[in-house]
Image: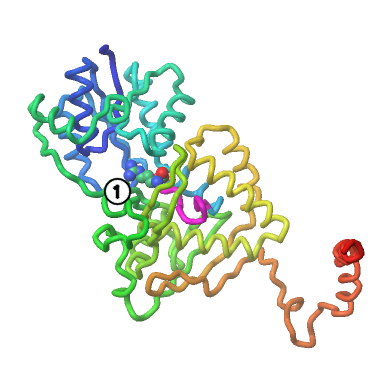
Amino acid sequence: MGGKVVLAYSGGLDTSISIKLLSEKYGYEVYTVTVDVGQKEDFDEIANKAYMLGAKEHFFFDAKKEFVENFVHPAIKANALYEDKYPLSSALSRPLIVLKLVEVAKKVGADAIAHGCTGKGNDQIRFDVTIKALLPDVKIIAPIRDWGLTRDVEAELIRKYNIPLKPKRKIYSVDENLWGRSIECGPLEDPAQEPPEEVFQWTIDPKDAPDTPEYVEICFEKGVPVKLNGEKLSPVELISKLNEIAGKHGVGRIDHIEDRTVGFKSREVYETPAALTIIEAHKDLEKLVLNFNELSFKKLVDNEWTNLVYRGLWADPLREELEAFINKASERVSGVVRLKLYKGHVIVVGRSSPYSLYDKLTATYEKHSTFDQSWAKGFIELWSMPTVVSRRILERLK
Ligand code: ARG
């Protein structure tokens, strides 16, 4: 083989061994790429490790801002919760990582792009589809999936190539970015068992959360959060800060049975304090400013967008076509939502907007209401007509 390969490098064991394998066994010149999407890692140490293992050149991208603005913000506007639960945190980061891999691949004139995904997950699909869509002629290598790099084989390779790494027996597979933390494997594979407390790092056990609730106010402009408690923050700061505040109250834990794109069901655990708080607030604000027709149609579009992104089709033109509708519908989604965080719960307690469709004079039960109740009787005559007529026929057929 040989040639140049660009490897998505996390600094973990699998991708570290992949550097050696790609260079020593398959004769590639290896270019490593690490993308900071908000995972808290020592990126200098990762770079050093890449060089120590034989990388020809290491590339680092701080893509936190791009991640939030171009991936998380569209997800907020789409109220993206896969199967009503999962805010797509890992799913959103994959296409962005691919953008960086492709950028480097073009720069160095790579023949191949490699990543550390297994053959059982969704991430391989997200990587491969996006790479194919952006750089159709590049070869894709996934050493774990394609070359059967199991833990035992890895231990063997570590010995064979004298790799200065310790074969670790990790219990959990964790993936982290600003929008959330995914935890899989180990005892979590038994869906009947409660997740052990040790899997959680961003959220306190709700039973140990403060006894007094904390209120937060999120201000949205055109569907995206811009201020937290009245303070204008950068998109990255706002999410980081809210992760901390909501996590302190045990908000953001998710435990659900997820339908993977590869066909099987899996038990997934997440911690996404900011994501759940922001989406809850965003949905509520939409209900204040969008009418019934808009809300019902938007739900369908949101669901389509979410499934598409989960299933690895970020690069499909349909995503942007759906976003054209979502962005149009988000033009009036501006205002402030007040929420209460309390022992694992996030509760919307107030909302206001210059575009509010709520009219107190119409809604009030006080007698000065502008809603003329005499209109209702005639309306019900017409509204009920199809139901009443068909019921009459059904009764006759009995
Ligand atoms: N099930 C989630 C998804 O498909 C999480 C994936 C987490 N990835 C990982 N390498 N641990 O988006």
> Residue 294, how many percent across, how many down?
70, 55
Tell me if 325 is positioned left or right of 243 in this view: right
Q: Is residue 51 magenta?
A: no
Q: Residue furthest bottom?
A: 367
Q: Position of residue 151 (x, y in %)?
A: 20, 36
Residue drawn at point x = 63 percent, y = 63 percent:
287
Figure quadrant of the C terminus = bottom right
The residue at the point 49 percent across, 25 percent down is 133
Q: Main secondary structure of the magenta part?
A: loop
Front one among 316 and 107 = 316
* Residue 199 appears in the rendering: yes
- Tell me if 123 is positioned left or right of 8 in this view: right
Q: Quadrant of residue 107?
A: top left
> In which quadrant will I find the N terminus?
top left
Q: Which residues are magenta?
A: 80-90
Residue 76 visible in this rendered orientation of the protein: no
Q: Which residue is mark 1?
A: 185
112 relative position to 149: left or right = right
Q: Out of 28 and 144, give the one closest to the viewer.
A: 144
Quadrant containing ligand 1 reads top left
